[in-house]
Amino acid sequence: MNAPVVLAAGCVLWRLSPLDGTLELCLVHRPKYDDWSFPKGKLKQAEDDLAGALRETLEETGHTAAPGTELPTQRYLANGRPKRVRYWAAQATGGTFTPTDEVDRVLWLSPAAARARLTQPRDRTLVDALLRALRLA
């Protein structure tokens, strides 16, 4: 029997550094998995993918965001079930991070540092896609 696909969405959240104006990407640390990733999560029943991506980004980072270009969709197995995650580039527009049980830390990193810190190699392709979307690659 085929398991239903888990539908999720997230954002590659970015900003210009308040210190020097360089591009920074936001990574979240999930203590349950002890990993670093982009903010994402499962969609609620009948929730629009982009709305879910922005909701999850706000919940996990404390930041509101202005969505931009859709980035490549990722498909993989999670706990033996197929999962589909749609991503968007999103510029942070304000907010403050507050640690939770789900996400205990966030880091704002240069694209190269974010690529090195990401736990899953598949997430690194999103860094490159964001740079192309922002015409920086």
Image (spheres, grey):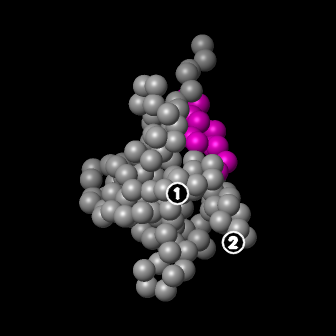
Helix, strand or loop at mark 2: loop
Q: Give the range drawn in magenta.
A: 71-86
For the residue marked with disc 1, what is the amino acid?
Answer: Ala
Q: Residue at x 60, y 73 (%)?
A: 112
User: In the image shown, does 27 or 63 lie closer to the viewer?
Assistant: 63
Looking at the picture, how far across and down is residue 24, in whole percent?
A: 51, 72
Residue topped by disc 1: 90
On the question of residue 32 being in view, the answer is yes
The residue furthest top is 1
Q: In the rendered view, would you say 18 is above or below 107?
A: below
Which quarter of the figure is the N terminus placed in? top right
Q: Residue 26 carries which label?
A: none
The residue furthest bottom is 20
Which quarter of the figure is the C terminus placed in? bottom right
Residue topped by disc 2: 136
Relative to residue 43, is residue 84 drawn left or right? right
Relative to residue 75, is residue 32 drawn left or right? left
Q: Which residue is drawn at 45% across and 70% down?
A: 108
Earlier residue among tags 1 and 2:
1
Other-residue count near label 2 (Cα within 10 Å), few / some / many at <14 / 14–19 / ≥20: few
Q: Residue at x 45, y 47 (%)?
A: 54
Looking at the picture, how far across and down is residue 113, in whole percent?
A: 55, 73
Identify the image quadrant of residue 41. top left
Q: In the rendered view, would you say 52 is above or below 6?
A: below
On the question of residue 34 being in view, the answer is no
Looking at the picture, how far across and down is residue 85, in whole percent?
A: 57, 41
* Cα separation between marks 1 and 2: 15 Å
Looking at the picture, how far across and down is residue 44, in whole percent?
A: 41, 30
